[in-house]
Image (cartoon, rainbow, N blue to C red):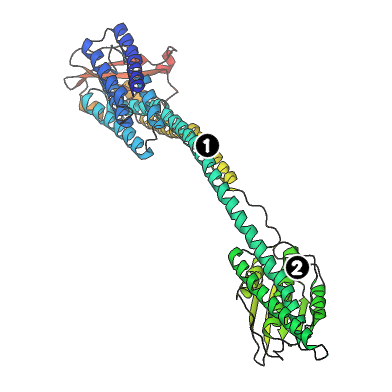
Amino acid sequence: MTWRRLGDVGLWAALSFLVLAESGTRGDPYWVRASCVGVLLLAAFGRRRWPLAALAVVAWAQILILIFALGTTHGVQIALVPAISLLSYLAGRRETQLKHFVMVCSWSLLGGLALTLVMRRQVRATESILSWLVMLLLALLLVVLPWLVGRYRAQQALLASAGWERAERIEREQRMAIEQERLRERSRIAEDMHDSVGHELSLIALRAAALELDPTLPEEHRRAATSLREAAATATERLGEIVGVLRDADAPVMPHDETVAALVDRAAASGLNVRLVEEGTGELSPMVDRAVHRVVQESLTNANKHAPGAAVTVSVTSHEDNVQISIVDAGATRPQQAVPSSGRGLDGLRERVRLVGGTLTAAPRPGGGFEVVATMPRAGGRPEAEKPTDTAEERATVRRSARRGLITVVAAPLILGAVVGVVALGYYLVAGYSSILRPAQYDALTIGQREDDVERVLPAMEMIDPPGEGYHPPAGWSCRYYRPDAPFSITYVYRLCFADGALVAKHLVQSGSVTPTPEATG
């Protein structure tokens, strides 16, 4: 806090030095110097809490100086201008809202124009408006541009801070990703245990059941086969419990190297009444090939568990765009043994098929038995185009924001300045063409002619930029200036002076660096 106050004192001292140096050179009254130093004191110590208020205080001090000093022999004090630009920049760094900044600037400019028209009634309104437009152009350069630069710098600092926050968030996300990867690995192990080990246990139980019913074997061997079948059932039950602990919702998508034909042959060799029907050929994507294998494997396992002795038909039909798998059993022909089941096999199959863009249905058949049908696109599950990471997207957003900020800093004042310049030029041309007094009309005017008669000939407006010839009319005289031709094409103007309701003087006045020739005045 102490260093902040020292900084405020240093800023106030530096800005006050400029004011005192200029005022001392100009010989301004002491109350003017004290007022400016007091305004800078308020602005320097209030800029952190009320940045726009500090800017407005100094800006209005400069506006009042302009109103009372413009057009006088004292000149205009400009030592407050650096303070205005600096405070505008600091207001931008404080992240003040755009609408508040625009309100302060617009109300200050409009208030300055209104105060000028009220306080300087001796100056023509057209000249005051043109001076105000020039002041508006200067405000764009000295106030708006520094605020935009400050705003841009504030956004850069904010983006840098956001970068550190992003790094911390990435670190937390990495820890979460490690945990998710661990859960995924558990899921993969659970799926492999359920699909592979469970299938093999089912085949062991099937073979043991066949030995148990073989009448050619001795009784003790059949009892051993019974024990083997029960042990396989118990192992399947324990496997289900382990899978329940390890299992996650995700399904693995790694390819499998065993074909469906080899899987069916191995199941048939174990005693399952199964046959394979294949129609059409074509390459499948690795994920689809894995899914087809898992669908057939799980369906054969379920048929062995829940429909002992049933004839099973496995059909794999490859079309141009998709592959269809159908596993149909005709119904149990032997009494069904109590077989533990987790009830998650079909759910895992549906998820696996969904991941490759396919669909799976499983339902009992009307005539008996059970049917599983899966349809998958041949190219399903191919790796998608790599999506940009969150970091890359945030980096692109930061770069876009920085580019927009830089363009705003440069382009906004240029566009606003161009608009104001066009308006000022248009106003100047309108006033210029509305203040033309033709040479023939000027020559027709006579000294002593009544002012009312002269005004019938005069144009609608007077010149808004009469030549600075340093002419001071006598007391009671009022002088007006008119152009003999269009703006930018003349080197002289007409001056008409009135007193007591009559024309008392008419002169041709040089308006440029080139002396007008007698022919030009004719």
Q: Is residue 293 above or below residue 512?
A: below
- Classify mark 2: helix, strand or loop: helix
Q: Nearer the viewer, residue 216 or 38?
A: 216
What is the quadrant of residue 304 in the picture? bottom right
Percent across and percent down for residue 111 are: 27, 31
Residue 61 coordinates in the image, percent (x, y): 27, 22
Of labels 2 and 1, earlier in sequence is: 2
What residue does disc 2 label?
289
Q: Residues within 10 Å of mark 2 (few under 14, many from 20)?
A: many
Give yes or no for contact between labels 2 and 1 (Cβ–Cβ under 8 Å). no
Q: Secondary structure at mark 1?
A: helix
Left or right: residue 455 versus residue 344 is: left
Q: Which residue is painted at 34% across and 18% down in the image?
A: 6
Residue at the far left in the pictured view: 500
Q: Toward which corner of the image does residue 416 lie, by quadrant?
A: top left
User: Which residue shows up at 76% across the image and 65% down it?
Assistant: 256
Q: Looking at the rendering, which quadrant does residue 234 occupy?
A: bottom right
**Is 186 situated above or below 224?**
above
Please say if 462 is above or below 261.
Answer: above
> Which residue is denoted by mark 1 in the rendering?
402
The nearer-to-camera label among 2 and 1 is 2
Mark yes or no: residue 218 visible.
yes
Counting from the top left corner in percent of width and height, residue 522 is at 40, 18
Vertical side of 319 occupied by 420: above or below: above
Question: In the image, what residue type sits under mark 2?
Answer: Asp
* Residue type, label 1: Ala
**Residue 320: percent from left, percent from top:** 77, 72
